[in-house]
């Protein structure tokens, strides 16, 4: 037998609140290893004495067999002075080692707990809050680290004797399960009447009955309150839209099972694995044709018809499963708030909301406090792998690892779809999604969470980084924070930050060609950027090419009014947009699209002519290279969508039209022109990347920005670039939209710090 050594093995990642220490002890027992394991401020630290070969096998077993919800971000191994152990011991948690703390994200109820919940002989039969070592709320109930029961909202629920016995028995699957509870000692379902009448039914049975009657209800979930309605009841959906002040944007739909989802949507193996994961994200799935759904089950499908995608997801809590069982079908489950406002967290907020919303019939809640609100995450599968659209519940605050990064940084993020980021060395903690920073309420929650996350992870920022836009709330916040804390402030151009987010995810120092397309971003020249080709290396960038500037109507509503973007591009083409440009200015041929609009009388009204006149006289105009506005313009010219009721609606419907042309080729109509436009943009990207390759010798490309949420454009572009020999990278763990720029800001600030 070889010489024995003592090693300390430190693991960073989701290794608390998921049964990791008992798991380590079981592996050690199976392999007859001696040593000890403890939680150390968010890390797991293992010390073992054995031969180097057997320790290697032990570490491989930990990586290979880790509990399903666990995630190992990084492993560090050190040789210590030799120690002798008589066995393997689980030590109590330690407050030390807080240099890279980890807090587990909220985890959906696991299959074992669901089996117990439906077992009539089990003492947790029909317990809505059933959980164990590997499932249940984490981040939304924690007060401080380490993740122990006394440091969470569960401190308000003393364990009964049976739960305490399970909690303290090493061999029990609820050993050290911090959210352990039962009917006797855990949270209970409560309800508050608003306009509904009381009944003898249990709370969840009553909730389902109200939904069947056409009512809208409120329900307290892991990360905040939800509003729930029947997606096939047109009046109920209309009531929900009135409550939410949300006219058109499709709602996400919660299904009972994968099998039920497959009745409505197409799903592949990657998508099935993703939607059943412990994060339980909302997954964008292509729905089946409405005609096919009507043949299967005749009903009102107007809600599903709003898009070719359905935001589908599965329950996270036992109580949601029970309610769906009673109801007998899928349900709209959306955040409880008015459009643009933060999700409701407390009972007082919910009850005040109900006082002003008689269309909400009843609230179903519990008294376990939510310490911080977290919206559901949204993902899609693109290019055969998951891509984050909104990174929140189930993922935040799991850190991302940025190789070579140093220092402690606070990145403020952007104004829209905001997330911020705090980092310590290579660990970047991207916050949950906060939405747009336009309201005082959103700003207050943002401020609170910056302080909360910095405190939880023991991070004292040494610098702060933000967007260049002078009017963003996050810019003003960063300026004030820098002064109050006497730390340096760095401002990073918006599209550079987008590219930086891809570089951070894939450990790219550069140089890379960054293709950064979106609706709007403040440029270094004071104009509005959004169709950018950047050359990026470490923390620096060169603007190699961009969509040619177009004079556009400005103002707060310009992003909503796609018809104004159309007027701007028609005016530009009439003024010679296609004829005159420099080498770094890109034009896209849309003359046939304009001709289609003219032949069909689209946009031929007084408002359109007024907009043209305003541009002729430079009244309230700006200059923009925005790809997002070009997509809006084409959508309006083709008569597909002329007004964005919600951000990106016109571009999304343009993509839907292109998808229809792919399914039904050969018809010369607006759908065919929509597809041709997508093909032109992808081809333009190919040509420009080849030119930059020739000029700079770069063959790595990063695709990013909200425009690349367009699946058709993304996959066309990937195919063209790969066929030319480019190495292509894109966002996976953070969103390509503005929710990902905080990570890019962090990366760029760190790289500049290393110069």
Image (cartoon, grey):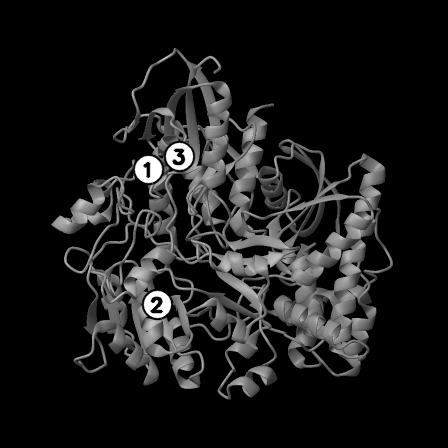
Quarter of the figure with the C terminus: top right
Marks 3/1: CA–CA distance? 9 Å
Element under label 2? helix
- Counting from the top left corner in percent of width and height, residue 43 is at 38, 32
Marks 2/1: CA–CA distance? 29 Å
- State which tag comes first along the sequence, 3 or 2: 3
- Counting from the top left corner in percent of width and height, residue 561 is at 60, 69
Q: Most extreme residue toward the right, as rendered?
A: 579
Residue at 29% over, 47% down: 173
Q: Most extreme residue toward the top, as rendered?
A: 81
Left or right placement of residue 611 versus residue 194 in this view: right
Residue at 26% over, 76% down: 205
Left or right placement of residue 300 versus residue 596 in this view: left
Q: Which residue is mark 2?
A: 321
Q: Are marks 3 and 1 in contact (CB under 8 Å)?
A: no
What is the quadrant of residue 666 in the picture?
Answer: bottom right
What is the quadrant of residue 99 in the picture?
Answer: top left
261 or 495: which is nearer to us? 261
Left or right placement of residue 310 versus residue 237 in this view: right
User: Label 1 crowding class (10 Å Cα cut-off): few <14, some 14-19, many 20+?
Assistant: many
Q: How many marks?
A: 3
638 or 2: which is nearer to us? 2
Q: Is residue 126 above or below residue 382?
A: below
User: Label 3 crowding class (10 Å Cα cut-off): few <14, some 14-19, many 20+?
Assistant: some
Which numbered dot is residue 22?
1
Residue at 15% over, 49% down: 159
Can you tell which of label 3 and label 2 is closer to the viewer? Answer: 3
370 or 147: which is nearer to us? 147
Marks 3/2: CA–CA distance? 34 Å
Which numbered dot is residue 27?
3
Element under label 3? helix
Q: Are marks 2 and 1 in contact (CB under 8 Å)?
A: no
């Amino acid at each position: 037998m070889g010489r024995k050594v003592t090693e300390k093995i430190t693991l960073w990642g989701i290794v608390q609140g998921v049964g990791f220490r008992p798991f380590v002890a079981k592996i050690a027992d199976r392999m007859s290893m001696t040593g000890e394991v403890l939680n150390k401020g968010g890390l797991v630290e293992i010390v073992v004495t054995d031969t180097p070969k057997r320790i290697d096998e032990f570490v491989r077993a930990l990586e290979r067999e880790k509990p399903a919800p666990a995630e190992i971000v990084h492993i560090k191994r050190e040789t210590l002075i030799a120690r002798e152990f008589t066995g393997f011991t689980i030590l109590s948690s330690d407050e030390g080692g807080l240099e890279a703390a980890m807090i587990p994200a909220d985890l959906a109820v696991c299959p074992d707990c669901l089996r117990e919940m439906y077992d009539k002989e089990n003492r947790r039969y029909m317990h809505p809050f059933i959980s164990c070592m590997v499932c249940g709320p984490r981040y939304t109930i924690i007060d401080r680290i380490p993740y122990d029961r006394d440091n969470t909202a569960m401190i308000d629920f003393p364990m009964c004797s049976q739960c305490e016995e399970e909690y303290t028995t090493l061999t029990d699957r609820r050993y050290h399960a911090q959210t352990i509870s039962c009917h006797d000692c855990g949270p209970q379902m409560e309800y508050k009447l608003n306009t509904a009448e009381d009944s003898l039914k249990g709370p969840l049975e009553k909730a389902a009955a109200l939904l069947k009657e056409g009512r809208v209800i409120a329900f307290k979930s892991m990360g905040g309150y939800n509003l729930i309605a029947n997606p096939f009841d047109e009046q109920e959906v209309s009531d929900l839209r009135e409550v939410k002040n949300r006219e058109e944007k499709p709602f996400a739909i919660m299904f009972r099972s994968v099998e039920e989802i497959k009745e409505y949507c197409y799903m592949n193996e990657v998508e099935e694995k993703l939607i059943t994961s412990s994060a339980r994200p909302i997954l964008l799935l292509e729905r089946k044709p409405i005609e096919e759904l009507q043949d299967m089950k005749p009903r009102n499908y107007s809600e599903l018809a709003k898009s070719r995608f359905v935001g589908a997801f599965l329950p996270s809590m036992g109580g949601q499963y029970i309610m769906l069982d009673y109801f007998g079908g899928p349900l709209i489950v959306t955040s409880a708030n008015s459009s643009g406002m933060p999700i409701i967290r407390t009972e007082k907020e919910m009850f005040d909301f109900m006082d002003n919303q008689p269309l909400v019939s009843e609230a179903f809640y519990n008294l376990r406090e939510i310490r911080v609100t977290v919206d559901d995450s949204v993902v899609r599968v693109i290019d055969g792998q998951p891509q984050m659209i909104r990174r929140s519940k189930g993922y935040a605050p799991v850190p991302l690892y940025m190789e070579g990064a140093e220092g402690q940084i606070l990145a403020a993020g952007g104004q829209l779809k905001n997330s911020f980021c705090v980092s310590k060395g290579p660990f970047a903690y991207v916050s949950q999604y906060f939405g747009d920073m336009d309201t005082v309420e959103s700003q207050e929650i943002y401020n609170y969470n910056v302080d909360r996350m910095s405190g939880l992870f023991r991070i004292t920022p040494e610098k702060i980084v933000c967007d260049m836009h002078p009017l963003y709330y996050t810019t003003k916040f960063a300026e004030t924070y820098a002064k109050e804390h006497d730390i340096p402030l760095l401002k990073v151009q918006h599209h550079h930050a987008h590219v930086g987010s891809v570089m951070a995810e894939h450990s790219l120092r550069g140089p890379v060609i960054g293709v950064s397309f979106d609706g709007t971003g403040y440029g270094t020249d004071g104009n509005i950027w959004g169709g950018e080709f950047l050359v990026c290396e470490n923390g620096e960038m060169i603007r190699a090419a961009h969509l040619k500037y177009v004079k556009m109507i400005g103002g707060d509503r310009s992003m909503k009014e796609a018809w104004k973007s159309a007027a701007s591009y028609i005016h530009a083409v009439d003024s010679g947009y296609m004829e005159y440009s420099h080498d770094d200015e890109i034009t896209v041929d849309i003359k046939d699209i304009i001709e289609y609009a003219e032949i069909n009388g689209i946009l031929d009204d007084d408002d359109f002519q007024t907009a043209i006149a305003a541009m002729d006289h430079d009244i309230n105009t700006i200059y923009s290279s925005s790809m997002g506005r070009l997509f809006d313009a084409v959508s309006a010219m083709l008569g597909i969508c002329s007004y964005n009721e919600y951000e990106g609606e016109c571009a999304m419907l343009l993509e839907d039209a292109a998808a229809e042309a792919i399914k039904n080729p050969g018809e010369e109509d607006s759908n065919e022109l929509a597809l041709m436009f997508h093909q032109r943009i992808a081809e333009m990207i190919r040509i420009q990347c080849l030119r930059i390759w020739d000029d700079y010798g770069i063959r790595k490309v990063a695709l990013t920005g909200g425009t690349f949420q367009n699946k058709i454009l993304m996959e066309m572009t990937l195919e063209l670039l790969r066929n030319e020999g480019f190495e292509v990278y894109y966002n996976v763990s953070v969103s390509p939209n503005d929710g990902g720029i905080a990570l890019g800001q962090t990366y760029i600030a760190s790289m500049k710090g290393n110069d």
